Amino acid sequence: MADTTSPAGGADSLAPTQPTPTGSENQKTIIMSRAEGDTSIRPFNYHATDDELADLKRRIEATRWPEPETVNDQTQGVQLGVSQALAEYWASKYDWRRCEAQLNALPNFITEIDGLDIHFIHVRSKHENALPVIITHGWPGSVVEQMKIIGPLTDPTTHGGTAEDAFHVVVPSMPGYGFSGRPATTGWDPAHIARAWNTLMKRLGYTRYVAQGGDWGAIVTDMMGVQARRNCSAFMSTCRASFRATLTLRFSPAERCRPIFQTRKSVPASNSPSFTRKASDTGSSWVCVRNRWEL
């Protein structure tokens, strides 16, 4: 890996918490050039070079801004001042080295699925009966969004919960996002990604698991619930249109009216209707359970 010193600027002085690999090539490049058909699971971490960070800053600062909007609200889109403030934050205030250290402190891996390298974080709980869960980010998002929930999910007793609340957590980067490979052909739609995620979970030894996703991740998660009924015991979507869209694509009108099933844990009476209403009345989020949550 390239230079491990921090760029000038003070804020980027935090070093990664795991040692970075040595060698003349960037580790990401090495991983992405593995032979097609390799289904092994390989450790991964990432370190941006000083030159890459400096180039990013130069390009942000070289932005050619348009003229301001002619109104005092957002009816003409994102306001110029908002965009400029965001650019200033990214150029001079955002601490990538801190984020990089937090990312590399977690167990990151790469594995090939259907000819494409898939990056994912995998953290197993210390609790024996932890429930495996796969969590999918949305657009334009990344696994960074989920890093803050990994601790409470895998180690609930440290965060006020009980051992029964524990999960083994898998957080993949969708194809073309983050450190996952970029598809060279079409076809990596939500249904394909859902199949890949089921393959990933089984490759990790999880034949029964639950799933959660938001935004585009919600659509992928819904597709997992439809496709992998023997493996995906339950799923939760946090996108208003996702479950309705999946039902429209995969079920007949009669099938769409079947009630949703039970939940694993007790649900307050005020929330019960969200688990018994018919699918055609779906709201902003759903938990869909097939044979209860128990594995």
Image (tube, grey):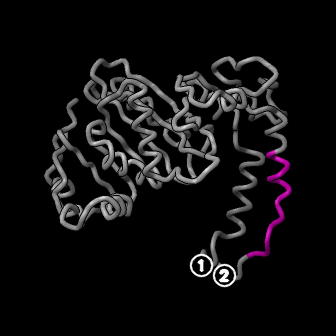
User: In terms of depth relative to the viewer, which is nearer, 55 or 94?
Assistant: 55
Q: Position of residue 59 (x, y in %)?
A: 83, 52
Image check: 253 left or right of 80? Answer: left
Q: Hey, which quadrant is residue 42 in on the image?
A: top right
Classify the position of the N terminus by image quarter: top right
Residue 22 painted magenta = no
**Residue bearing the label numbered 2:** 71
Q: Nearer the viewer, residue 99 or 226?
A: 226
State whether residue 257 is above or below residue 267.
below
Question: Where residue 98 sits: x, y (%)?
Answer: 66, 32
Q: Is residue 235 visible?
A: yes
The reply to whether residue 265 is in sight is no
Tag 2: amino acid: Val
Q: Residue at x 58, y 53 (%)?
A: 186
CA neighbours of label 1 inside 10 A, class few (<14), some (14 to 19), many (20+): few
- The residue located at (42%, 27%) in the rendering is 203
Residue 233 lies left or right of residue 38; in this view the side is: left
For residue 229, what is the image quadrant?
top left
Query: Residue 95 location, x and y as percent?
Result: 70, 38
Q: Amino acid at mark 1?
A: Thr
Q: Secondary structure at mark 1?
A: loop
Separation of disc 2 and disc 1 at Cα?
Answer: 8 Å
Crowding near pointer 2: few (<14 within 10 Å), some, many (20+)? Answer: few
Q: Secondary structure at mark 2?
A: loop
**What residue range appears in magenta?**
56-68
Left or right: residue 258 compared with residue 161: left
Q: Where does the image place residue 159, in percent across and percent down from the top left?
A: 37, 29
Tags 2 and 1 in contact by the CB under 8 Å rule? yes
* Left or right for 91, reference 106: right
Q: Residue at x 85, y 36 (%)?
A: 51
In the rendered image of this protein, does residue 27 appear above or below residue 86?
above
Q: What is the quadrant of residue 129 in the picture?
A: top left
